[in-house]
Amino acid sequence: MSRIGKKPIAVPAGVEVKIDGRKVTVKGPKGEISREFDQGMNIALENNEIVITRPDEENETRALHGLTRALLNNMVVGVTEGFSKKLEIVGVGYHAKMQGKNLNLTLGFSHPVVVVPPEGVEISTPSSIEIVVSGVDAQKVGQVAAEIRSWREPEPYKGKGIRYSGEHVRRKAGKTGAK
């Protein structure tokens, strides 16, 4: 039984939802997102709430029920509040700066790393060691943040690298000198 799938999604004021067969478009103050869902799920708009029902009780259908509801909820939250991920840069000589819309990272390589954000994702740098990735699509925001982090993941000995804000990096003891 999918408890998540059974919960209706409240549509706040100022958000417009269009359901056209499998394709759902959600438009709000922050932007617009559209996505196609599995044809087995029945998506309906009733009394300012999105209700998802499933046709049968098979395992795959039950799993898709909760997934469909979660994705639709993320779409509604994205166009009203938006999503953001904060990254921190730790390391001597490591820093980030914006060049137009592109992010320019200096991470100890012989060349600067330039990250071009995809459409619908904004990158900003409040300081030279902080990066904020924001947008309306949760999947795109998380993907861009993960790609930025992958350029220099935090290493366990000194803790240098790019990490998510609040991420705990497990530290290891270095080599001990021979006596």
Image (cartoon, rainbow, N blue to C red):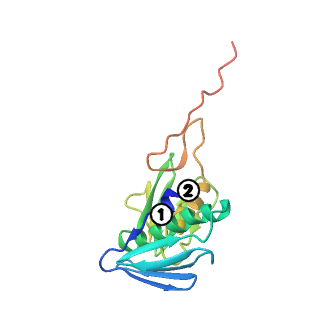
**Residue at disc 1, secondary structure:** helix
Which residue matches tag 1?
A: 6
Quarter of the picture holding the N terminus: bottom right
Badge 1 amino acid:
Lys
Locate residue 22, reporting x and y percent. Answer: 58, 82
> Which corner quadrant of the image does residue 146 belong to?
bottom right
Q: Which mark is residue 1?
A: 2
- Classify 179 as above or below 68: above
Locate residue 15, reporting x and y percent. Answer: 35, 79
Closest to the observer: 93 or 143? 143
Give the CA separation, mark 2 to mark 1: 9 Å
Residue 122 visible (yes or no): no
Residue at 61 percent across and 61 percent down: it is 63
Badge 2 amino acid:
Met
Counting other residues with Cα less than 10 Å from the Cα at mark 1, is it few (<14), some (14-19), or many (20 or more)?
some
Closest to the observer: 15 or 176? 15
Q: Are marks 2 and 1 in contact (CB under 8 Å)?
A: yes
Residue at 60 percent across and 37 percent down: it is 156
Tell which circle, 2 or 1, labels the residue nearer the N-terminal end: 2
Residue at the outermost top position: 179
